[in-house]
Image (cartoon, coloured by chain):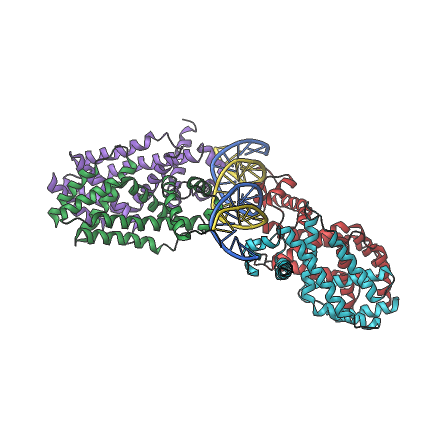
Chain colours: A red, B cyan, C green, D purple, E blue, F yellow
DNA sequence: AATGAATGAGCGTTCATTCAT
DNA sequence: TATGAATGAACGCTCATTCAT
């Protein structure tokens, strides 16, 4: 009998530990050795759980996207009025700012390498984006696709601003404005 | 005026030719050989004009940002009313969609590598972002920083949507909405 | 203008220097680093001249086979009678014993790796063997294919004996016997 | 008699199952994992029965050589005249062609790695070759060492021809000729 | 100014081997 | 006895960079 290890559970633990690293340095700039060292295993172990670097990255993107959706749903389910929900969304973004910046970096990275002969199996990825939109739709209870897009793009824009600039406008303030806009336009 | 003018002009030509390559594959994934081959010179020549890969990339980011500003100013200077300007901004984004996507990729890439012990000289970069904001400010003649941020973030969000999704909402439609919002809130 | 180097000539020089190494250790057991070190270049240079290890080995086999044929033809062309030729063949084998052992090792190695999903382009190799046979045929002026085979197989058997055993029978003695056999059977 | 008998018997079973694998890919090209997988045990088990890869290979060579000798003796013991024996030898070679090719590959491999700082304990190997020769000597009842060598080398040459060429001369035909030669020369 | 041959550190990955179970 | 997860040195190969021409 081999060492008793929940292979799948451990795999996901390793994935979680990789998140920061990939976000900080980008797919091509990290090395497998760095990853291994940083998460405290040997390269051999890394390859025991992931076929190669590409597979590791793809599984990371999927796992993070899955986690993100779960978090968001859990967080926002307790709200009632549109007003409340916009505020909750804003709070959620503000509180997990770093997380979302990292996720954004991951996604952009993923798109970049997806187009260059690699990572084609990514049906799961585009799908994740769609689920996201659908989720906003369900959650905010907005019908107009232009408005949904507005909310999504503004959210992403806010995150991007955080990444690109040193001092950014407060997310809360933006959300107050967003709330006003939505209230008027629905 | 001996060769020094030609040298600088040629350097900028080389930079322009690198833009697509860096945007498509990302800083770390591209090799100097690929770049050289793609733009039709030898690696030796590349190193004759740029101290190293990092310097090449930094100069590229600066050059592209500079060009972008020039383009935008030229394009939008002929407008008058706020209504017109919003429309012009929307048209500008829509017409240069690919260009802005590439620029976004470049910027994200730049931020990623800037934090990892390299590319510290990037005062010029943060500065570029500020100029951008200032330019929107001057151009749209909006005082409220929250509103400026809204315009910038929505623009970036739109570009990001283009990158991440297959089918996106029309930029024009979004701008119609944006126009309405701004008109009401000013 | 780059360093002036006759690329093809230098490539062949490198190949010649690899011969002993591949024969001694076998294809899979040598490393590219060992080869590079042993022939006095860097691994980078090795890869500048050969696409990969497999290609290096294939070119080596072809080059050695080609050289071998040239040597043999040059050596044996000056003989007249069958008697003389058998003696010359024996002398040739005896004098280049080490060379032929190495060639045999190369060939066996080649066959082994050729069958395992790699090295399929080896039309040139089987062809080399046929040329060899044809050359013996032309040279010894023997019609009977059974006799040709006898000569070839005995030659190879002699070489193999050299490889497998510590003390072997003298090649010359064997050739005296061979000569007698051929004289009788023609 | 506790488990020691089973242990040894199982060890030899494992060895037998390795034969094809080593012959096909060669010592260095095969991995312990491949071997384990192919013969249906874990790598742990492999290391339970063999100290390391080298030991496994050495024991394989010895075991195969031992088996070969047994087979040959059994097969050829029932013959009487020289004529019969030559024919029996030919038939034996022809019927076990694949086996002999594999054995040849093993031997060549063994010699190659024996010289490179490893596998020095190979007294048993050279010894095997000598036994082989002695056995031919006893069996064919030939005194002249030159003739013995002829028979051995021709046999090995025939096997080698099988390995190196696609279509080879029939072993039987060669043996008819060999028979004639021997008859004349004794 | 321009070339591309040369370098060697470092990359992704593999593999013989160990050892807790 | 038997397993397979874990290790890390070493593999084939790449790449930013240098430099003789």
- Work out which quarter of the rendered image holds the C terminus of chain D and state it: top left
Query: Could you say which quadrant of the image residue D106 lies in?
Result: top left
Residue D77 point in image, percent of width and height: 21, 37
Residue located at (76% from left, 57% from top): B129
Query: Could you say which quadrant of the image residue B150 lies in?
Result: bottom right
Residue C10 point in image, percent of width and height: 40, 49
* Closer-to-camera residue (A4/B70): B70
Residue located at (76% from left, 63% from top): B155
Residue A71 visible here = yes
Query: Could you say which quadrant of the image residue B73 lies in?
Result: bottom right
Is residue B134 toward the left or the right of residue D76 in the image? right
Looking at this rendering, what residue extends furthest in the top direction? Answer: D1
Is residue D156 toward the left or the right of residue A49 in the image? left
Residue located at (30% from left, 53% from top): C128
Is residue D16 toward the left or the right of residue B142 in the image? left
* Closer-to-camera residue (A30/D174): A30
Residue B180 point in image, percent of width and height: 84, 70
- Work out which quarter of the rendered image holds the N terminus of chain D and state it: top left
Is residue A15 toward the left or the right of residue D38 in the image? right
């Amino acid at each position: 009998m081999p060492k008793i290890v929940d292979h799948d559970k451990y795999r996901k633990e390793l994935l979680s530990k990789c998140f920061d690293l990939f976000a900080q340095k980008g797919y091509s700039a990290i090395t497998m050795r760095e990853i291994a060292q940083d998460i405290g295993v040997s390269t051999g172990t890394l390859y025991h759980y992931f076929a190669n670097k590409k597979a590791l990255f793809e599984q990371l993107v999927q796992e993070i996207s899955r986690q993100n959706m779960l978090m968001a749903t859990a967080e926002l389910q307790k709200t009632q009025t549109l007003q409340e929900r916009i505020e909750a969304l804003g709070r959620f973004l503000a509180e997990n700012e770093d997380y979302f910046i990292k996720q954004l970096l991951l996604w952009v990275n993923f798109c970049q390498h997806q187009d260059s002969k690699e990572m084609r199996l990514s049906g799961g990825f585009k799908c994740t984006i769609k689920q996201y939109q659908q989720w906003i739709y369900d959650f905010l209870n907005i019908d107009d696709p232009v408005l949904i897009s507005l909310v999504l793009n503004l959210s992403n824009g806010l995150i991007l601003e955080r990444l690109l600039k040193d001092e950014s406008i407060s997310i809360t303030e933006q959300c107050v404005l967003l709330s006003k806009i939505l209230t008027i336009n629905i």
